[in-house]
Image (tube, rainbow, N blue to C red):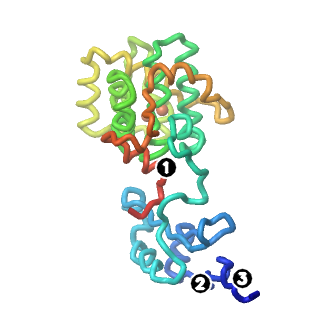
């Protein structure tokens, strides 16, 4: 009797296992989640870094070794809820992503940008665009973040808001003295004083400047402050009304409404899924 109870205890099913030296030396042990007390089924779970994150880094050389780890008993690839992340509600809304998924610093930057825009009495479309402009950096991918972000929110916001988010990426590099926008000091630190963005960014910015919604996107860049207070806490609820009027939350929840971008929201819900 005692034996059968013992046998049912999931922790006893996990065999002791030493990671191969190659993975330990590469510092990749962090990609394998050992069965902790809060794990769903006490199995060791491997997180394989996405290609976009590993490419060009030492981590890419060890993907084979990570894959081989799945052959061990009680070891599987991460699928579904990662116990290291807070659980998302079944039908998540924008606020849930801000509170449970976006990086703290990313969410704070978005909220502070939106707050500055609101204080200046700008149009709600501008406030909404500021609130969402770097959502891709905070929750999905940094490279091409304006484009990813614009697509992600496209079905739920006014076309002008999505456009402003997309174009802020290119416009950010180009001063417009007529409205008091200068090249960001932060970019000198980030990219060096000699950085010149690629040709397509020059083209995108030049085209955006001729567009009727130019000023909406320009206002995103003007309120896109990097000298923000890292400790400031801006409550998402301050924007509840603006979001209510300017963001169409799907009834099924973001990620489950069958929209062409639902997969992007699901990727933020389960960012470590193997497939
Ligand atoms: Fe940005
Ligand atoms: Fe930003």
Between the C-alphas of marks 1 and 2, the distance is 29 Å
Q: Quadrant of the C terminus?
A: bottom left
Q: Is residue 176 above or below residue 7?
A: above
Cβ of disc 3 within 8 Å of ligand 2? Answer: no
The residue at 41%/44% (across/down) is 256
> Seen from this angle, which residue lies furthest front?
1
> Which residue occupies the foreground of this view, 247 or 168?
247
Q: Which mark is residue 5?
A: 3
Residue 41: x and y, percent?
59, 70
> Which residue occupies the foreground of this view, 26 or 114?
114
Cβ of disc 1 within 8 Å of ligand 1? Answer: no
Total residue callouts: 3
The residue at 62%/72% (across/down) is 35
Element class at badge 2: loop
Instruction: Point out the frontmost of discs 1 and 3.
Output: 3
Residue 257: x and y, percent?
38, 40
Residue wearing tag 1: 269
């Amino acid at each position: 009797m005692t034996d059968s109870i013992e046998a049912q205890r999931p922790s006893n099913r996990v065999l002791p296992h030493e990671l191969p030296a190659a993975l330990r030396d590469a510092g990749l042990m962090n990609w394998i989640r050992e069965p902790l007390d809060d794990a769903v089924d006490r199995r060791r779970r491997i997180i394989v870094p996405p290609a976009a994150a590993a490419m060009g880094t030492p981590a890419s050389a060890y993907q084979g070794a990570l894959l081989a780890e799945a052959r061990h008993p009680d070891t599987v690839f991460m699928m579904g809820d990662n116990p290291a992340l807070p659980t998302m509600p079944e039908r998540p809304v924008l606020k849930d992503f801000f509170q449970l998924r976006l990086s703290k610093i990313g969410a704070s930057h978005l909220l502070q940008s939106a707050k500055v825009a609101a204080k200046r009495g700008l149009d709600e479309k501008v406030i909404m665009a500021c609130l969402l402009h770097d959502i891709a950096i905070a929750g999905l991918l940094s490279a091409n973040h304006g484009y990813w972000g614009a697509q992600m929110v496209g079905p739920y916001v006014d076309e002008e808001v999505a456009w402003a988010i997309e174009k802020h990426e290119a416009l950010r590099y180009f001063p417009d003295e007529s409205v008091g926008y200068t090249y960001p000091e932060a970019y000198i630190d980030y990219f060096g004083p000699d950085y010149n963005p690629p040709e397509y960014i020059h083209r995108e910015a030049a085209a955006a400047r001729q567009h009727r919604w130019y000023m909406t996107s320009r206002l995103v860049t003007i309120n896109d402050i990097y000298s923000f207070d890292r400790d400031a806490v801006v409550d998402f609820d301050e924007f509840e009304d603006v979001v209510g009027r300017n963001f169409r939350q799907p009834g099924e929840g973001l990620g489950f409404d069958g929209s062409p971008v639902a997969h992007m929201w699901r990727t933020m819900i389960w960012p470590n899924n193997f497939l």
